[in-house]
Amino acid sequence: MEFIKTVWKNRKLVWGLGKNDFRNRFASTSLGSIWGFLQPFIFMVTYVIVFQFILKTPAPGDYPYAVWFLPGLAMWLCLNDTIVSASNSIRAYSYLVKKVVFPVDTIPIISIISSSFVSIFLILISIVVSAIYGFLPNVLMLIYILFSAYCFIIAFTRLTSAITTLVPDFSNLLGILMQLFFWFTPIIWNLGMLSGHETILTLVQCIPFTYLVTGIRDVFLGGDMITQSYGLYTIVFWVITILIFLWGNYIFKKNKKDFADVL
């Protein structure tokens, strides 16, 4: 694939720009990049306090609520922040598109790398908390689910970054859609609540976000989302991801030459 070759060829440039992008987000503040880690950390702690200690929401099964909840929330924050950032990346880097010869295909990857520093931090928080409760992650499954998440992010933002560049209003629509996906993905509720609604349950399980959130929970709770408990939806997930990538790649390549004119 031309896209993969372009990213690989410019990997050092992309990595360097990704690190700089993360630093520059908080360059004007006293604490600098610490804010990038502190904000989502407090967000996660607040959710745990509210749902576990105030609302006393039980986790499905006999698992501690924090072990069930934190990995799923960490995965969602990773998906949401990275998708929103990468989708707006070409407009954010418009000066590269307009003024120099630059591999435009790599720009969303720069934002993905920039957002990954916080995402990895949140995953590490989940690992530490789960380990305190005696739940250690399955390393192979963790690698698989993170690989799956980034494949989906790259595919999805290949499409959304192109559309956002051509139609700026799509950025606002994407924000609304991500809010809807947050509530329709079992992050603060569990799939067992839909046990009496088989059609709705099946549709929800086909959503890639559900696959990734459920999958990372299985990493800590001993499930096998690849084959046993979620095997069919593994196939569905990869089919959807590949189709989105092919569609996004077509839209991106077809309109790439027009990006400089609309920015």
Image (cartoon, grey):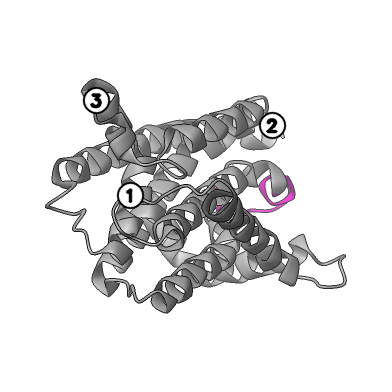
Question: Where does the magenta region start and end?
Answer: 93-104
Q: Is residue 23 left or right of residue 79?
A: right
The residue wearing badge 1 is 60
Whole-percent x, y for residue 215 in the image: 30, 53
**Residue 261 - label:** 2
Whole-percent x, y for residue 15 in the image: 55, 69
Closer to the chain start, of discs 1 and 2, is 1
The residue wearing badge 3 is 196
Does the magenta portion include 213? no
Q: Amino acid at mark 2?
A: Asp
Does the magenta portion include 97? yes
Closer to the chain start, of discs 3 and 2, is 3
Q: Amino acid at mark 1?
A: Pro
Residue 206, by quadrant, is top left
Q: Is residue 165 left or right of residue 220?
A: right
| Secondary structure found at label 1 | loop
Residue 240, by quadrant, is top left
Q: Count the marks.
A: 3
Q: Answer whether residue 240 is visible to the viewer in this image.
A: yes
Q: Residue at x 42, y 65 (%)?
A: 8
Query: Residue 203 versus residue 168: which sits nearer the camera?
Result: 203
Q: Residue at x 44, y 32 (%)?
A: 184
Whole-percent x, y for residue 217 in the image: 34, 57
How far apart are the two marked residues, 1 and 2, measured between alpha carbons?
52 Å
Q: Is residue 135 left or right of residue 57?
A: left
